[in-house]
Amino acid sequence: MLTLKKTSKFITFILVFTGFCYANAGYKVTVNTFNLHGADNDSLIVKQLAEFVQECQKKYDSFFNFQYQKNVDIYLARSNEEYEKFNRSDIPEWSSGVAYTKLRKIILKPGLYYDPERYRETLFHEIAHMYITEVSGSGSVPVWLNEGLSMYLSEKQLSWQESIAIGNALSANSLVDLNAIDSLLLFSNTKAELAYLESFLAVRFLVEKTGERSIAELVRDFSLDYTLDQIFEKHVGYSFFEFEIEWYDDIKNNFRWMSWLQFENLLWLSFIIIIFVTFFLKKVRNRRIIREWEKEDYLDSEN
């Protein structure tokens, strides 16, 4: 049951969100059941976003074997200030977009300059949340699976910096348990970013175990009265706990050496290599000098 305080917050959010939607009603493009809104001077960007939506729908309809039929409104905020003003206070400051699946609305953060790849990845990510909610029948999909699958479907590529962050977390024994990621919005920015990366890696590992075709069925099973362990027994062959242990071992095998690529470690490694090379060159030089002395002594003795 909603408390009076929670109800008041929800009503306030709806009123503020309605104001945001009204303020951004300048330019509109419709793609099937997706309506894209933006300011008049962002019309070219909105048109390209519409192309991304069309591409995204085609991909997800095939991936989930499901056609999304409900209306979704996508709003391109006119400024960062507006994006922050009309979002919840617990949304990370580094986020590029937010999906409100129950309201079927997505808000995109504008950039300092137009970056098509960034907008495409963000759109694919947020629309994935819409599909996951519908396919699962609004079942309790774990946050790590929801976020990780959205990142996987948006064709996320792990950067060197992100790989090093995983390696550092391994070295510090600070990886977040997958179930604990349900509290993602309470995390600090650094911990939240780590949790997102772990979610992506967990889903990528899950896809390697089961194949892409099984993932949609796995998500669909959350609409039934199955436990997480039952779903994993069905699609993976063993419990979620066993899966997490195996995934953790995979993380260790692939990322434990990445912490050495930090600048400080590279600096010390370079210093050690320089000392070793200097010592080696000096030793070679000394041997050459000794041989020359021996040669001179031999010539003197002959004379």
Image (tube, grey):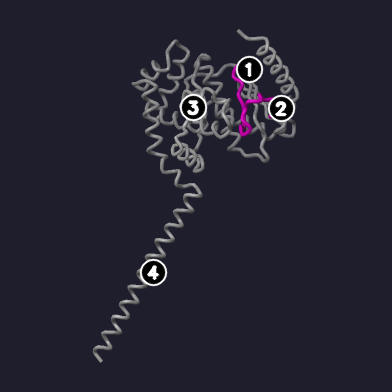
- Secondary structure under tag 1 reads loop
> What is the three-letter code of the residue carrying label 1?
Leu
What segment carries the magenta color? 84-102
Label 4 with label 1: CB-CB less than 8 Å: no
Q: CA distance from mark 4 to mark 2?
A: 65 Å
Residue type at mark 3: give it: Leu
Work out whether residue 251 or residue 27 is closer to the camera in this orientation and state it.
251
| Cα distance between the residues tagged 2 and 3 | 28 Å
Quadrant that contains the N terminus: top right
Q: Which residue is mark 4?
A: 282
- Of tags 4 and 1, the one toward the viewer is 4
> Which residue is identified by label 2?
85
Say what secondary structure mark 4 lies in.
helix
**Residue at point 41%, 43% (across, down):** 257
Residue 267 to residue 259: above or below: below
Q: Could you tell me how far apart the alpha carbons at marks 4 and 1 are, in whole angstroms?
A: 72 Å
Crowding near pointer 1: few (<14 within 10 Å), some, many (20+)? few
User: Looking at the image, is mark 3 or mark 4 earlier in the sequence?
Assistant: 3
